[in-house]
Image: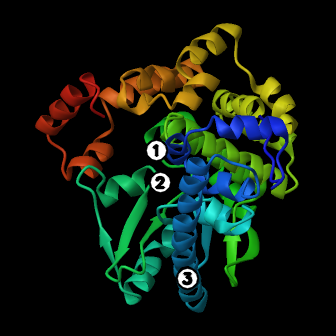
Amino acid sequence: MALTSSPHPSADWNNTLSSLDADWLREQRLASMTWWMFRQANLPDDLQRDLRRAYYAAAGDAELHQRELAHVLRQFNDQRIQVVVFKGAALAYGVYPDPACRTMGDIDLWVAAEDMERARQALQEMGYERFCKPDRPPALMALFQGEIGLHHSDQAYGLVELHWGVFPGEWLRRVAAIDVDAVRHRIVRTRLVGEVAHILAPEDAIVQSVLHTAVNHQLSMSPLRALVDIALLARHHPVDWSAIAQRAQTWHVATVVWLVLSLAVDLVGLEEAAEAARELQPSALRRRLIGRLANAGSLVTMRDLRASKWRYVFLLLLVDRGRDGLRLIFRALWPEREWLIARYGRYTFTSRLRHLFDAARGKI
């Protein structure tokens, strides 16, 4: 299925759309995009009504997010705090044909560690208040390049997340060797929603989206929309696919990038990524094993690996080097002292035993 933006679909597309289910499109977060693309098509009445409703609801949210993003960027620009807009906001207002086509739940901003407290205070001046999840304390978030969440008291505003990095998580911290300084050096100055902004270079944005989709969400959270994100990034910007392949190999994330790019080729017609995917593919045995857990069919049916202990097997299969997989297992069971302090607030033998017991039961 090739990605198209034509509002005049062929007869084959009309037949395909007639068989689509609005609930499935909403779960894949593609309902508003489908309406925008095929708004002039002869859709069944029920499907047309449901998709139109989804689009107009998304358009209202996009308008609120646009106003919020403009206010936030203006505040940071006034205080000379450089932030990098990534994920949903960068895609909706910089890549998608209509912001309503790319729904989002929050605004994600990457802030240099030395500017994090200034950035938090700048948002606090605007009425945002920090909140923390019990299992995600700030010290732990800082350790693996996570985020600080801030809610606004005014319901016209939403959630802003300040990130220590754009490649968060324990898997990446243990396994990957991402050159974060080089990623920051390559950021691009642009304008979003009428304000000066910075975004990731297109190759880095694609790798970030790939890793977020496969590692952080195990291809289980609106996976087809994630592939559309990647395809539209590639179609909107000139992309050096050889650079992506080289970075994936150097950063030890070749297997992950191969998997998502090959799925993008098969499911959304991203043929220009096919050569890079072939260059990065792991052994035939590894491809076969990964394919048992993640494939085109599992993405279409939205199989949720996050709810299964098979996710640990999946994440191990994505590791490029065997020794990194062993380290991942060991540190999942027996993390460093600083990790335990960040997670539980203090280090005791009891906290170590508690973590070991939880990890052995798959509660990490």
Badge number at residue 67: 3
Q: Secondary structure at mark 2?
A: loop
For marks 1 and 3, the one nearer the N-term is 3
Q: Are marks 2 and 1 in contact (CB under 8 Å)?
A: yes
- Residue type, numbered disc 2: Gln
Quarter of image, res 25: top right
- Mark 1–mark 3 Cα distance, whole angstroms, equals 30 Å
Q: Answer above or below: position of 350 versus 205.
A: above
Rendering coords of residue 200 (x, y %):
70, 61
Q: Answer above or below: position of 195 versus 171.
A: below
Quadrant (top left, top right, bottom left, bottom right) of the C terminus: top left
Quarter of image, res 160: bottom left
For marks 2 and 1, the one nearer the N-term is 2
- Residue type, numbered disc 3: Arg
Return the residue at label 2.
145
Near mark 3 (Cα within 10 A), the count class, few <14, some 14-19 or many ≥20, is few
How is this picture coloured? Answer: rainbow
Q: Secondary structure at mark 1?
A: loop
306 with respect to 250 (left or right): left
Q: Which residue lies at the image location 50% right of the left edge and 67% below the top edge?
A: 113
- Mark 2–mark 1 Cα distance, whole angstroms, equals 7 Å
Q: Which residue lies at the image location 66% right of the left edge and 15% below the top edge?
A: 287
Return the residue at label 1.
169
